[in-house]
Amino acid sequence: MQILKNLYKIILLILFAAMGSHSHGQIVSGRPLKVKNGNGTGPLALSALVSYPRGTAFISSTKGADLFVDDGGRAKPSGLYLYRYKGLAANGTPIFYSPVSIDSPFKKNGSIFQTPDKVVHGVWLSESNLVHTVFDFNNLKFTEIERVSLEGLDMPAPSNVTVMLNPDGSVEAILEVPGGIKGEPRPPMPHWRSEEYDPFDGAGIWRGNLNFRCLYAVSLPGLLKGPATKPRLVSKSKLEVLMSMQQLTMVNLGRKHSRDLITGSHFGDFHYYNNVAENGVGFKKKQLIVDAIGTVHRHPSIGPVVAAWPNPENGLSDLIAGGEGAVYYYKFNGKFTSKGQPEYNAPVAVLVEQADLYAGSLPVVNVVDWNGDRVLDLVAGNSEGRILYFQNIGTDDVPSFLNGIQLEAGGYPIFIQPGYAGDIQGPGEARWGYVCPTVVDWDEDGDLDIVMSDATAKHTVYVNTGTSTAPNLILAARFFATALMSMGCGVSNRPPGSLGTGWPTSRWMQTTSSICTGGLTITTWKMVGNCAWKMGN
């Protein structure tokens, strides 16, 4: 009976975590849970699969630029939002007020920027047109004012655009376009959900094509005046960035670097183009942005869209970037390597006031007493590949959760990345971890461990060698079945059906065979003498 009571409480709390909010200390159905850390700030992220910074502008304050963020069309209805600048945290991280919705005929595939006359512009791609909009702050609205046709121009269809203003008043529209395939073209593959889909050959090589992107430009007589000139390749090659650049942003990095360009990418690195032309485009060979010791930056999540954010102290371009996860801030340290690579500090999460509790995209949530204080906490895996712990400093009846802390094992953050061949969908999925943890006392020693599957379809256990009040996870141990490593078929939050790891695990037998990629699930497992329950989101 006590087991059933505890299970009922866990079910209710998971539902509250997905649906609730605090109002005068109480949870309100249908509203997000809020961060309860004293100041209410937490990671900036939309209530959508992705959060894409689309541009910045000084609108509500002269002390710091406001931020435009869209959901990449991955929400219904799709939205564009303005985050007004509030200030800087003690460590220099920008803090923004809660977002307000912006009325705009376009919400993606564009760039928002501000000209010296303080006007805020949005330039967007729409079919075969460049569309120019201007922002009305009083009505929180972008209004279309003109279009320039790109139809009939000799170049592939562009997917992203930004605008470079020239000293003579003319404008360069910089466009991301398909560049080509590296190596010999291969025949089209069946859809990855098809039974005929076979991603790797016998040598472990991807059967599909590796598609690259490059940069073209068209010149315009003014902002945004046509006609567009003949398009020209402005990157040094057509094989510049694998799969996608995600977004293009103009940056000011100081003398001789005031009209440069940075792009995002599908896999999370950032590409830098130094423009040596005083008027027009004269990009040098692509570079990667690095940290202070020369290590290439790799964004915490897949597919970062990047926007330049003027540093409040020196006006140089820091970066704000977001993909399938929270939005992060990279501060430019004012230096370049001997190779000409700009140096940026390590990313930190951009903050927003009155923040919703954020577990990442596609969270798999466990409601457990992780720290042994007899109050239920949250432990959640996400698509980014991490496991977060949200401490409840309230009670079970009125929970108050702190921001998530990334769990570690063996002294290292748990961070699952399939890489080139680790995901059955192919290398395009290299940065999705799809972590599906189940928190349970696996070895029956009185403290909580983590049993997990992920995008690699491998089953693992992180054993807690600490205590119930001070957990200490060791590095993962793989499950084996009949002497072979136990594997699922894609993302699964089900432990394997027959295990042998040195612990008495062979008693487990799975009674269902479905895999979970979302939604609340409850699975019963037949055991010798008792019953275990498993839950995920």
Image (cartoon, helix red, strand yellow):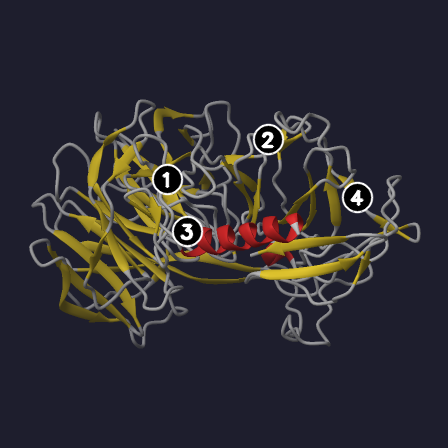
**Nearer the viewer's eye, disc 4 or disc 3?**
4
* Disc 2 to disc 1, C-alpha distance: 21 Å
Rendering coords of residue 11 (x, y %): 55, 55
* Residue bearing mark 4: 478
Mark on residue 200? none
Asked if residue 422 lies left or right of residue 484, the reply is: left
Asked whether residue 321 appears in the rendered view, the answer is yes
Rendering coords of residue 440 (x, y %): 69, 43
Q: Residue furthest right?
A: 482
Asked if residue 351 lies left or right of residue 85, the reply is: right
Classify mark 4: helix, strand or loop.
Answer: strand
* Residue bearing mark 1: 35
Classify mark 1: helix, strand or loop.
Answer: loop
Instruction: Tell me which numbered mark, 4 or 1, is placed earlier along the sequence.
Output: 1
* Residue bearing mark 3: 235
Classify mark 3: helix, strand or loop.
Answer: loop
* Residue bearing mark 2: 372
Task: Identify the residue shown where x is 73% and y is 76%.
Answer: 196
Classify mark 2: helix, strand or loop.
Answer: loop
**Nearer the viewer's eye, disc 2 or disc 1?**
2
Q: Amino acid at mark 2?
A: Gly
